[in-house]
Image: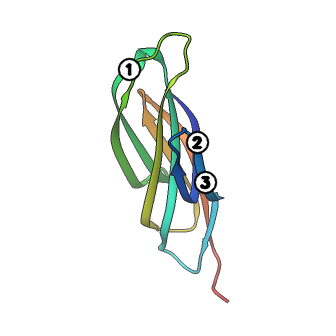
Amino acid sequence: MDLSLALLCEEAHARPDGRFDVRGVFNELSAPGFPAVQARMTLVLVMDWSADEAGTQAFRADLVEHGGKRVLTIEGETEVSPRRIGGPAAQTRLVLPLEDVVFPHAGRYRFELVAGGDVHRACSLFLDERPET
């Protein structure tokens, strides 16, 4: 499995033609204090699968703080269609709206995707403390 796209945004929608409409891509947030709650954000992931990975594939996306502690886990399965060798890769396209995500402290966070037997660094996010004015 190859991770071909990973991003955080305000909102995303998958179109029937395989394209995404994405609004408000970000990799930084600020809060007046911690722990902080992000009311809404969306994680977008696209996984490309090889011909020998057809069938049911489990995946897990972990939001991990700088010290390695998991803050949030999303688990699921996807059905990978058989493809001919040399043809286009089978894809799993995920739009995952997240609500009320709690960030315990300021600093760097990252999403890690565990799929196809490997851990893939997906996208990162930096949380900054900014007092309200």
What number is the disc on residue 19? 2
Q: Are marks 2 and 3 in contact (CB under 8 Å)?
A: no
Residue 63 visible at all: yes
- Give the structural element (helix, strand or loop) at label 2: loop
Residue at the right extreme? Answer: 133
Which amino acid, by three-letter code, is at mark 2? Arg
Which amino acid, by three-letter code, is at mark 1? Ala
Mark 1 or mark 2, earlier in chain: 2
Nearer to us: label 1 or label 3: 3
Residue at the bottom extreme? Answer: 133
Residue 57 lies in what quarter of the image?
top left
- Alpha carbon distance from label 2 to label 3: 10 Å
Q: Position of residue 84 (x, y in %)?
A: 48, 11
Check disc 1 and report the residue beneath it: 54
Q: Position of residue 129 (x, y in %)?
A: 62, 74
What number is the disc on residue 10? none
Left or right of 67? Residue 99 is: left
- Give the structural element (helix, strand or loop) at label 1: loop
In the rendered image, the vertical position of residue 13 relative to residue 6, given as above or below: below
Query: Which residue is drawn at the image coordinates 37% and 49% (left, top)?
Result: 74
Check disc 3 and report the residue beneath it: 22
Query: Which residue is drawn at the image coordinates 65% and 78% (left, top)?
Result: 130
